[in-house]
């Protein structure tokens, strides 16, 4: 037998032996990583609430504090969300309200004019994770566990809505009348029953932005970050839109407003579809007279 043939056979046998050893070792190892099939649940007790008075800020950021051995993805279900509301007359100050059961796992710190709210999410998991049915798990060496979370809510009462939500919670802005609102979120965003001069939202590309029952003078929308957005029963005077590549929007004939399209590059396109009703369109390129 030629030497090169022996070398090739040796390499193949080595690969087979190593693969078998890996299977044997994994079959006896602790199943640290597994995917959930809907049986991992984390319920935050809803017995009492607690209030945290907030220092004045220009921007407020909500983010998690994870440990080095984090192995859970939190899928927020019922009673979960960041709810932004106007300051109550009784409190007359910025404050954060949340379940008392979370009080040991939330703290605030400042960085210049930014207030950062940190959530010790892994500590919450250790405290309130319900027992997992061992028979309902299947092994996958690289996938992080998923948890169905209920009762995880934060109520922010504020006169300054410049909020960056880095949690996977949806963001709800309700009943606020103010000059400007800025919301950045990696979850869904809902603006409901608000009156604002300038509204700007930055969301995750695959999440939803909804505006309903609201009056907005100028709405800034970067369509690279807000692909799924919708308005309902709202009055928006001006849409300031930007984006790259091809973008598509659908408008109802009953909606009124002016659209200013500012492409990020020469290949960007805005495609407008009018649905359902007769409409009037006034088109004007930049540089033309009003």
Image (cartoon, rainbow, N blue to C red):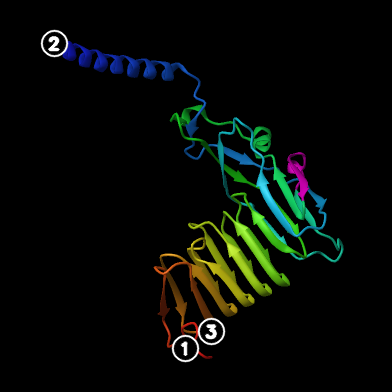
Measure how far apart labels 3 and 1 are at the Cα level. Answer: 12 Å
The residue at 44%/74% (across/down) is 250
Measure how far apart labels 2 and 1 are at the Cα level. Answer: 81 Å
Percent x, y of residue 256: 53, 84
Q: Image quadrant of residue 14?
A: top left
Q: Does the magenta stretch include residue 101?
A: yes
Q: Is residue 265 magenta?
A: no
The answer to whether residue 89 is left or right of residue 230 is: right
Q: Name the residue under label 1.
A: 282
Q: Earlier in the sequence, mark 2 or mark 3?
A: 2
Q: Image quadrant of residue 41?
A: top right
User: Quadrant location of the N terminus?
Assistant: top left
Label 3 secondary element:
loop
The residue at 21%/14% (across/down) is 9
Label ID, residue 256: 3
Q: Which of marks 3 and 1 is nearer the N terminus?
A: 3
Q: Is residue 100 above or below residue 11?
A: below
Stretch in magenta: 99-111
Label 2 secondary element:
loop
Q: Are marks 2 and 1 in contact (CB under 8 Å)?
A: no
Label 1 secondary element:
loop
For this orientation, the residue located farthest to the left is 1
The answer to whether residue 116 is visible is yes
Label ID, residue 2: 2
Percent x, y of residue 222: 53, 66
Q: Is residue 65 above or below residue 261?
A: above
């Amino acid at each position: 037998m030629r030497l090169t043939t022996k070398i090739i056979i040796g390499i193949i046998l080595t690969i087979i032996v190593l693969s078998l050893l890996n299977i044997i070792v994994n079959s006896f190892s602790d199943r640290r990583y597994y995917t959930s099939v809907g049986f991992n649940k984390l319920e935050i007790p809803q017995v009492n609430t607690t209030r945290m008075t907030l220092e004045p800020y220009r921007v407020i950021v909500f983010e998690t504090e994870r440990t080095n051995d984090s192995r859970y993805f939190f899928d927020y279900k019922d009673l979960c969300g960041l709810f932004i509301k106007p300051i109550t007359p009784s409190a007359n100050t910025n404050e954060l309200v949340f379940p008392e059961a979370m009080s040991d796992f939330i703290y605030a710190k400042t960085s210049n004019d930014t207030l950062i709210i940190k959530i010790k999410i892994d500590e919450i998991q250790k405290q309130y994770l319900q027992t997992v049915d061992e028979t309902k798990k299947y092994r996958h060496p690289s996938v992080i566990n998923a948890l169905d979370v209920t009762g995880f809510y934060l109520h922010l009462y504020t006169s300054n809505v410049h909020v960056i939500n880095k949690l996977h919670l949806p963001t709800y802005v309700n009943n606020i009348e103010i000059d400007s609102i800025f919301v950045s979120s990696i979850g869904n965003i809902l603006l409901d029953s608000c009156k604002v001069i300038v509204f700007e939202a930055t969301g995750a590309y695959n999440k939803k932005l909804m505006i309903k029952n609201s009056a907005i003078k100028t709405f800034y929308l970067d369509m690279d970050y807000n692909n799924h957005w919708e308005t309902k029963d709202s009055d928006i005077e001006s849409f300031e839109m930007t984006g790259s590549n091809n973008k598509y929007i659908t408008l109802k004939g009953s909606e009124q407003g002016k659209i200013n399209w500012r492409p990020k590059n020469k290949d960007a396109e805005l495609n407008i579809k009018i649905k359902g009703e007769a409409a009037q369109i006034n088109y004007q390129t930049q540089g033309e007279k009003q």
